[in-house]
Image (cartoon, rainbow, N blue to C red):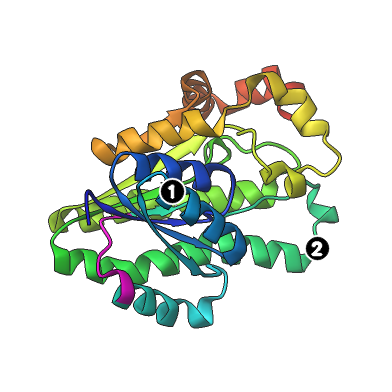
């Protein structure tokens, strides 16, 4: 295999698909993971037709009972994992009183528990290889929570807390741990997150393109660092909020409530 072996969860569409295409283009072998195997096989064929290497495996990161068996099976076929990109996740933008308990559970199972469990099961392989890189796709919502996103923001806060702790824990093993915190990206994420389309309409002019975000992730693979905030001005805004939360909520409360 040429280059690195890059595993990507949630690779069937949006950002995950774009990361896979760009990683394969630079010579990495990509392991495509998602629930929709039909979509993965189409991406795999596209990569192979362009001269790249790709392998597709059906996997649900929220299925915690079968996750370890699935990962071990994939590893037996692929043989290596140099980079894990925890990209799978979803959100629902509703007031707390409107969110069904089953949806809350699903969001935590996929966004948090699935991400943590997946990482738990691949870390021993990276330790044995004496190196690796874990990239968690978090969100600016993990730094600056907004109304109608309390559950989603809670999951992303959890991801960032996990990422920051794990970075220090795995440092002696030469394993890098990074967070990518994008603002809203123009993908089908909002098909479920914002069914009414009100949030997309309010932030459309600031939305990131998946190709641009994927490019930053590829750069992060090449040159690991603690975290990447996109866009930069939004990352700066999150930092200012952490310093002056009461002031920002008073000054920008109406803007933050546009969902």
Between residues 151 and 77, which one lies in front from this camera angle?
A: 77
Residue lying at 53% horizontally and 60% vertically, measured from the top left: 41
Q: Quadrant of residue 82?
A: bottom left
Nearer to us: label 1 or label 2: 1
In the rendered image, the residue lying farthest to the front is 49
How dense is the environment of label 2, judged by Cα within 10 Å: few (below 14), some, or many (20 and up)?
A: few
Q: From the viewer's perspective, is residue 69 above or below residue 132?
A: below
The residue labelled by disc 2 is 100
Residue 141: percent from left, percent from top: 58, 39
Residue lying at 25% horizontally and 65% vertically, measured from the top left: 80
113 within the magenta span: no
Residue lying at 35% horizontally and 37% vertically, measured from the top left: 218
Chain part drawn in magenta: 77-83
The residue labelled by disc 1 is 49
Residue lying at 50% horizontally and 47% vertically, measured from the top left: 16
Residue 179 appearing in the image: yes
């Amino acid at each position: 295999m040429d280059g690195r072996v890059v595993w990507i969860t949630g690779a069937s569409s949006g950002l995950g698909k774009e990361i896979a295409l760009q990683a394969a283009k630079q010579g990495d072998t990509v392991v495509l993971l998602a629930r929709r195997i039909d979509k993965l096989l189409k991406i795999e064929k596209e990569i192979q037709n362009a001269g790249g290497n790709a392998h597709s495996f059906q996997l649900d990161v929220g299925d915690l009972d079968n996750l370890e068996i699935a990962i071990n099976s994939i590893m037996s076929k692929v043989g290596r994992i140099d980079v894990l990109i925890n990209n799978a996740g979803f959100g629902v933008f509703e007031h707390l009183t409107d969110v069904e308990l089953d949806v809350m559970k699903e969001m935590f199972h996929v966004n948090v528990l699935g991400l943590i469990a997946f990482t738990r099961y691949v870390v021993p392989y990276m330790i044995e290889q004496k190196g690796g890189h874990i990239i968690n796709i978090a969100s600016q919502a993990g730094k600056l929570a907004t109304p109608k996103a309390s559950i989603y923001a809670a999951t992303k806060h959890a991801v960032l807390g996990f990422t920051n702790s794990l970075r220090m824990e795995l440092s002696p093993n030469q394993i890098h741990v990074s967070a990518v915190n994008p603002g809203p990206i123009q993908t089908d994420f909002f098909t479920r997150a914002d069914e009414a389309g009100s949030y997309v309409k309010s932030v459309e002019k600031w939305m990131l393109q998946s190709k641009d975000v994927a490019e930053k992730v590829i750069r992060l693979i090449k040159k690991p660092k603690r975290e990447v905030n996109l866009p930069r001005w939004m990352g700066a805004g999150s930092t200012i909020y952490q310093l002056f939360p009461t002031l920002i909520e008073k000054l920008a409360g109406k803007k933050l409530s546009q969902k």
